[in-house]
Amino acid sequence: MEHGQYVNPGNSGFQVILNSEYIDKTGLIGQMNSRIGSSEGLVCVSRPRRFGKSYAAKMLCAYYDSSCDSRALFDGRAISKMDGYAEHMNSYNVICFDATGFLSDILQRHGALHEITTMIPNAIQKDLVALYPYLAPESTLADCLLRCVEKEEKKFIFIIDEWDAVIREAGPETQRAYLNLLRGWFKNISFTPKVVAAAYLTGILPIKKDGSQSAISDFMEYPILYPDGFAEYTGFTVREVQELCREHGLNFEEFRAWYDGYDFPDCGPVYNPYSVMRAVRDRKCRSYWQRTSAAESLFTYINMDFEGLQELIARLIAGEEIEVDVDGFENDFESFKSKDDVLTLLIHLGYLTYHEDEKTVDIPNEEVRIEFNKILKGTNTNAKWIWLIQKSRRLIEDTIAGDGGKVAQAISEIRDTQYAPTFYNDEQSLRYVVKFAYVAAVDQYMKIEELPSGHGIADIAYIPKRRSPLPALIVELKWNKSAEGAIGQIKDRNYPAVIREYEGAAVLVGINYDPEKKEHTCEIERLHI
């Protein structure tokens, strides 16, 4: 059977994916199969860039497209063991397109973005008429689709990749026209039930809000904030990354530090799939993150210190979790009314990970932390931020030099700033202050909290990045005890043994706070691993 460009495009896109190393995510098809023909058949799954959105779209297209035989691609994979596998495979007409392709065409010929709302339906109709000559070219797209369903006795499955590109790139009027186009397909009582078996929209953003509700309210949405049943298909699971590392002889713990951090209640940790596969191919963990123009604008807000964002970023870089209200975000790149809106968009872009139960965010891993570290070197930082970074850099120098008195004094000074916790009454609050104090270490160190040793856990360890001449820093904290006791605990529990692969020196740092005297003390010892 013939293939169109947008209608029944075939399975070659997924075949190309399978020609490379492939992690089986075909279970996502089972999620869609269970929804076909039901009130939950309209699905919008939003994810950050480089999280396999296009892979999923091509996979779904290959499975449902009736113009091809895809058994050889799916037999033996996870979906083949699920209910409905044979019933739904290659059983539907498929409309599949990437919205960014239309935008690129317009921009290349210097057209107006509002043209996209006519380009998309015209392109689909052209395909339909070419594939089914009995359709009248002068008919509307809706009439062609209704006639096709009647004649072929097959409904359509819509698969739209980068569905939100128009929301991200175009102005309000074009956005409204585009949403009206989608409403005509997916919220039309005389069209949708007759034509649409299911729809799968994927992009970075959830559906644009119209007031307080989604503009296309019939869609079931699964954003990165709460992916629910789609969580394990958001990225790579721990088991999948462990297996990759085992097959290729790579260090799983290094992959965990670099690419882990997106945690979901029903799934556990999820890894950035693009970066993991690049690191496997290159046999080297490094940052493969690609900053987008949208992220650049957000970092401009941060450098401007929009509603005190620099203070929040300092706390995030230091390793703290920050409370955030995600409900007010309007699911676009423009309507920022508060710092919560900026932080929420950073979640959707993958720069922060959201903990639904606690309603907090933090920086997920070393790869993303490097991006935030670039803020430390920004040219528009304010005086408070510059003071903190300068104080932190001097603190690291004093730590390596073994000057416990200066380290204790610097921690006390940082404790008295706006970066410290409001309530300073336990070891956890001391931990926050110490992490702020060493915030500049992210430039040359990887920070690991609660480093396991087999005999307990060290509070914080700063491991030098590869080929760095700096020593490792192992920090133990005490509240109302003694800095000497903290050093003793590091030795007794043999914490340095955990970092033997990092040849060189280690600096043992014991820090105590005496709440009666209201003072910090610090003991430092240096040893060779």
Image: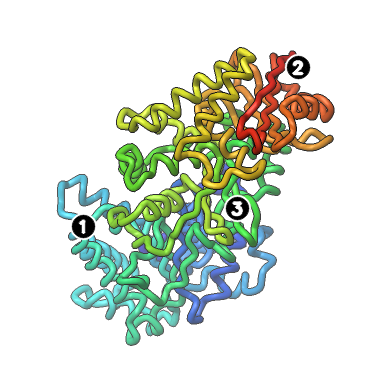
The C terminus appears in which quarter of the rendering? top right
The answer to whether 186 is drawn above or below residue 224 in the figure is below
Specify the amino acid type for callout 3: Asp
Q: Which residue is mark 3?
A: 263
Element under disc 2: loop
Q: Nearer the viewer, residue 198 or 435?
A: 435
Residue at (75, 24) in percent of width and height:
484
Q: Residue 345: in sight, yes or no? A: yes
Q: Which residue is mark 1?
A: 171
Residue at (80, 25) in percent of width and height:
488
The number of callouts visible is: 3
The x, y position of residue 462, in whole percent, is 63, 27
Element under disc 3: strand
Element under disc 1: loop
Dot 1 crowding, Cα within 10 Å, few <14, some 14–19, many 20+: few
Q: Which residue is mark 2?
A: 529
The N terminus appears in which quarter of the rendering? bottom left
Q: Nearer the viewer, residue 285 or 310?
A: 310
